[in-house]
Each structure stands twice: as C-alpha cells, then as structure tokens.
Image: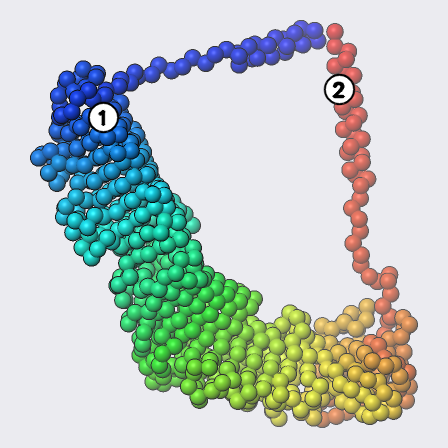
Amino acid sequence: MSRKTFLQFIFGLIAILFLWTLSPAQPAAATPELLCESVSAGNWSVTARWSCGRVPTTADDVIISHNVTVNVNTANIISLTVNSGVTLTIGDGTARTLNVAGNMSIATTAIVNSGANTGHVLNVGGNLTNNGTVTPGFNINLTGNLVNNGTINVGNNNTTRTITVNGSVTNNAGAALQVPTSSDTTHSLIVGGDFTNDGTFNARTDGNSLMTTTFGGTSNQIVSGTGTTTNFNLITVNNTGGAGNNIVEIASTNFAPRTAGGFLTLTNGILRLAGSYTLSNNVFTLANYGIPATAGIWLDNPNVTITGQNSQISLNGSIRITQGTYNIGTGTGGDLRYLNNSSFTMEGGVLNVTGFFRPDSVANTITFNMSGGTITVNNFTSDTTSGSTGSFDISAAGSSFTMSAGTIIIRRENSSTGTAVDYRNVAGTVNITGGTVQFGNNASPSGETYNIGATTGGTNVLPNVVINQTNPPTVSLQRPTVIQGSLTINSGSTFVATGYALTISGDWTNNGTFTTGGTATRMTTFNGTSPQTIGGSSNSVFSSITINSGAHVILPGNPTQVQAAAAGTITNNGTLQQTRTVNNATVQFMTISTDRYRGVDINTVNNLGDVTVTIRGNSGSTCTSEGAGSPNYAFRCFDIAPTNQAAARVTLWATTGEQNGIATANLAVYRFNLGDWQVGTARTTGTGTNSYVFAQGDVPGFSGFLLGNVNVVPTAITLGQMTTAQPASWVGVGLVGLLLLLLTAGWLKRVSRMP
C-alpha cells in the first residue's frame, strides 16, 4: 500500500465514525401505557366507573378522583394516584389485594383506608408518597421508599398490621407516622433502608397501642432527623449485610425508645448508638442477654448510659465503645463472658463490669483492641464465683490483644479459693504501644492483694502498670511476666516478683516496696527500644538484672536506689548510664551493691560538675572501627561527659568475661582525643571481687574511653573506613535514551521515503 492510499483509508474511516455518532438513536419499541381515571364514585369492579371503559388492568395507570372501594379479589395496575378530597377504600367485607407495580401517590386531603375485613393487602412495587391521610387496616408491602408528608395511622383496630418498606422511610416536618390510641395491639414496621424523622413518629402512643420496628436491611442503615417526637417501642436489628456494611446507626436528635425493660433485640448486624441525644436505658430486653456471633453493639454517644442488669452477659459477636458509659451487672456475678472468636473494641468512654471480664471457658478466644477509655472490672465486691478465671482474663493463646491507650482498672481482688487470678493475658498475638493496667483505685478497700497470672500457663503480658496509692494494695507475680511499658509502684503499695522472671520495656519507678529474691529464675530484664529510667524514692533490690542488646537504662544518681541480691548477677548487653556530681572527690559510677556491677571511678581535685557516664557492655559492642572481635580492647565501651573539662584519675572496670583475652597486667585506660587513642599516664591495674578487673590512668580531659591492651594501640576511626551510600548511576539511563532516540529517527526517515 502506498503512503497516499494508506492516509486516504485512515481519513475515510474517521469520517464514517463521525457521521455515525451524529445519526439519531432509534428508540426501542415500548409497550403502550393507558390511563384509567375514575369518573364516578362506587366500586372498583364497575366498568362504567373508569374513563378507559374497562376495569383497570396491569397495563393501566390509575387516577382516583372519586370515592372508590376496591372490591375485587386482586387488582393489578401500573401506578396509582389518589387525588385531593377523595377516599380510596381497600377492601370490603372480603379480603382484597391491591397490587401497584410502580409508584403510588396520595394527594393532600385524600384518604386511604380499608373495609371491615382484616385480610386486606397493599403491595407497591415502587415508591409510596403520602400527602394525605392513610389509616391502613391492611398490611403494606413496599418495594421502594416511603415518603410521608401527611398522616399515617398504623392500624384501625386491634388487628395486628405489618408495614414492610424495603427502601427508606422519610417522615417529613409536619407529618405523623403513628399508632392511634384506638389500636390496642402491637403492630410491626420493617425497614430495609434509612429512617428519617423530621416530624412526629410515635410507636408507643400508650401502653396498649404499640409498634415494633425491625431494621432488616442488607447494607448500612441510619436513623436520623430532628423530629421532636421520635418514640420507638421495641427495636430488632436484623441487618444481613457483610462485615462493615451491616451497621444500623441511630443518630436522631430526639431518639426516645421504650424506657422500662429495655428495647433491643440483636439478631444480625450492629446497632450503633451515635448522635448526641441523652439516654439512660437497659437497652437490652433480657437481663442475661447475649450478643450473637453475627451481631454487635457500638456505643458512640457521650450522653448515652447503658444501665446494668442483675446478671452476666454473653458475648459471641462484638462490643465496641467509642463514647458513653456501658454498665454490666449490678452485683456479684455480673460478668462479661466472651465466647469463642468474639470481639471487643474500646476507643473511649467507660465500661464498668461489676463482675469479671472473662472467657466463658478458658479455651475461648477473643480479639481485644483498646485505644482509649477506661475499663473497670470486679467493681462490686470480691467475687468468689470465678473458679479458674480471673477479673480481667484473656486465657487462650489463640486470642489477640492490641492496646495503644486507655486504662484497665482492677478494683477488687478475686477472692476465689486457692491462688485466685486477677489479671491474666497469655494472648498469642500481642501489639502494645501504650495504655495502662491499674491495680486498685480510690474506691478499693485497703490491703487488697492482686495476682498476675495463674499458677500454671504461659507468660503474661501487660502495658504500663500502676499500683494504686490510695488504700495501697499488693501485686504479686504468679507466672513470668512481660511489661511492655513502664512500672509505677506508688507510695505504700508493694510489688512482689519473688520466683518469676520479669521483663520491662519502659521506666521503673519505685516509691513503695519491691520484693524479690533468688537468682536467674527471678531475673529482671530491661529490653526497651528507647531509654529506660530506674527511679523513685525507694530502693529497688533486684535478684538479677539483664540489660538486653539495644536497651538503654539510666540509673538514678543515688547509688543505693538500685541494688542486687548477694547471689544475683547484673549483665549489661546494652547500655547503662548514670549522672552524678564530681567536685574534688572520688565518685563511683554504676557501682551496684559493692561488686554486683562496677563501672567507672573518677578521682579529681577539680570541679567537673555533673558527669554522665555511659557504658556499652559485653560482647557485640564496637568501640573502634576494628570491630568487637579485636583483641585490642575489652568488651566495654565507655563515654564520660562532664560539665567542665579538667584533669582526673579514671578507673575503668570490666569482668573477666569481658576481658577479651588481654592479660590483667596489660590493661590500660585509653582516651580518644583528636582522632587518636591515647593511653592514660600513671597506669595501674588490678583485680576486684566478683571477677572484676580494672585499669587506672590519669587523663587531661574526657571523651570516649576503652579498656585496652597497653601493648597494642587500638585503631582510630577514620572516614575511609565508613560506608556511604552511592548515588545511582545515570550512564545506563543515558545510553538507553540515546538508543531510543536513534531508533525513532530511523523509523521516521523510512516513513518519509514511502512512495
């Protein structure tokens, strides 16, 4: 094909497509719709009643302009309009059904009611808009939406009526959707979409004229509006939407459900009590209610209080608290008992449980998430009915525990026989970034004893731990414990860790009493990823201490505040730091219980001010670019930072295990100065108790130090030994770009040569 022919083909194709888009679309053939309007009052079944010359059929749009009674067994039409000032009566003495395939509208001053029989039915396949008055002595099945601008009186006698709206219900300002006082029975409203009331909605006109509302949608539904009367009776939530799309949210300005005996039945879906209305209610109709696996409740209104009932509850689905107050129980046995695969989320607000937060069986699992709010358990009396479960108890490894904020308070001790459990958390999946467990509060009796963990089982995990000061209690470990946060032992309170290992990643503050004993099995391990402080007004006597690699522990300036038992050990695999004042004196840094740990001694006639000593210890520490395996220095790195630089005599200590093969007689104090390691003058060496060795030397100032080999000077750190990231090479990118440019130019040249 020549170049000219090719271009002609392309332009021709474009022209054809353009003209095709301009041609008018041919409408599809439509089934003709006919209009039937009443021309006189009387029965539906009379042919002469209608302008179309026949009784309306499924092909007809119908207009009611006179008083008409539906007196055929089944009337089928396309749409229905009831004009102002007339009455449409559905049914007579025989049960009748009116089927409207499309929309139905009722004009102002129009009336729709029913005949004497109780079996009448109105089915509307589209939307129903009412501007008049409807008194349905019949059941209504509405596929679309219900919009009410007039009055709907549900029921005209004591026969139960059901209104089913698959779409939304909108009750506009000035409108009324209500049960008349003459009804004297309980009707039913089923809603599949949203419910908006800006007028009057009254489902409990009096004690006998009532209506139950069921929210039965398949996606999220919301109850809203500013109507001053929004009186619900009983509510059933049966929303079958998928997870996250099955929420029935009540956010009406003046939501007012039944007060006595609660109002809620949960079948499927989640009820969200949102908005800002004020409500104090049992909510659930049963005292010992259960939340099914496919259902849940979400408290998200600061002015709502769910009042407790005198029983336990069963959680098989979900509870979520964002705002408001949720009370469970009124006395002993008022437990929240969760079943397998349940879910609890606390984002704010308050949960008060007079009994325990516990599994129904110790093997039951739960997904627990807490990012705010306060949970108080064992809030009534010391429960003696718990058996093998605890006041706050996550007892199965299959559970998940996530906490970033908020407080769990255990108010009373568990008084069950034997060694009772007050806090247990052995969840297999744990993610703790904040939050607090507090043992005791201002309302707790004095002298309570709380146990962490059962006498058997796995390691217990907690966030920050606070032992209360008012009416100070005792908290005792019953199993190995990990605190993924800080520990605060308040004045007068006691923390007992005798017999079990403890790991902590936050600060240690002891203003009360800390009791421990023994050696390795009573190890306290510091494993934080940010600096941890040991402090408080009381002395802390540990059995043994381990500073994990990567951890950084700051000791108090008072050397007596951190001690170790005579049989204990202190192992520093991370970083230890202490700040003390040095002024014309000999000051020991990090000397714990005489010889459980030795760090640095400084002797000077000068005023150094506050001096901070940091030791990175044990194998793995790198003091120079030679790496930790170098035989030129012991496995400790020292940094000494005074307020004022001046001469002093420095003693560096290490254990024989950290000596790294250097003979004690060859040890020397090295100071890093101006890019070089310089040995201290007046060198002396020696040994201490508990397998400690030292070297001593005089130095003119302070910086980085190490305990090295006097015969082998450590290599200084140089820039040439540092590894830096190299910028990405653009040579390859440039070559590829050039190649593409050449190929493109060649192709264009070939096209230009086409005949």
Residue at 74% x, 10% y: name it. 754
Q: Which numbered disc, 2 or 1, marks the residue that appears first in the sequence? A: 1
Quarter of the rendering occupied by the N terminus: top right
Mark 2 and mark 1 in contact? Answer it, CB < 8 Å.
no
Q: Can residue 607 be seen in this view?
A: yes
Residue at 20% x, 40% y: name it. 136
Under circle 1, the secondary element is strand
Q: Quadrant of residue 317?
A: bottom left
Q: Quadrant of residue 115?
A: top left
Q: Which of 411 and 402 is in front in this view?
A: 411
Residue at 69% x, 79% y: name it. 554
Residue at 24% x, 33% y: name it. 110
In x, y percent, where is residue 670?
85, 80
Rendering colour mode: rainbow
Q: Nearer the viewer, residue 533 or 621?
A: 533
In x, y percent, where is residue 112?
21, 35
Give the amino acid type for the residue marked by disc 2 in the picture.
Answer: Trp
Per the image, the residue denoted by label 1 is 64
Q: Is residue 128 visible?
A: no
Query: Left or right of 69: which side holds 374?
Result: right
Under circle 2, the secondary element is helix
Where residue 747 is drawn, which disc sits there?
A: 2
Q: Which of 487 and 529 is in front in this view?
A: 487
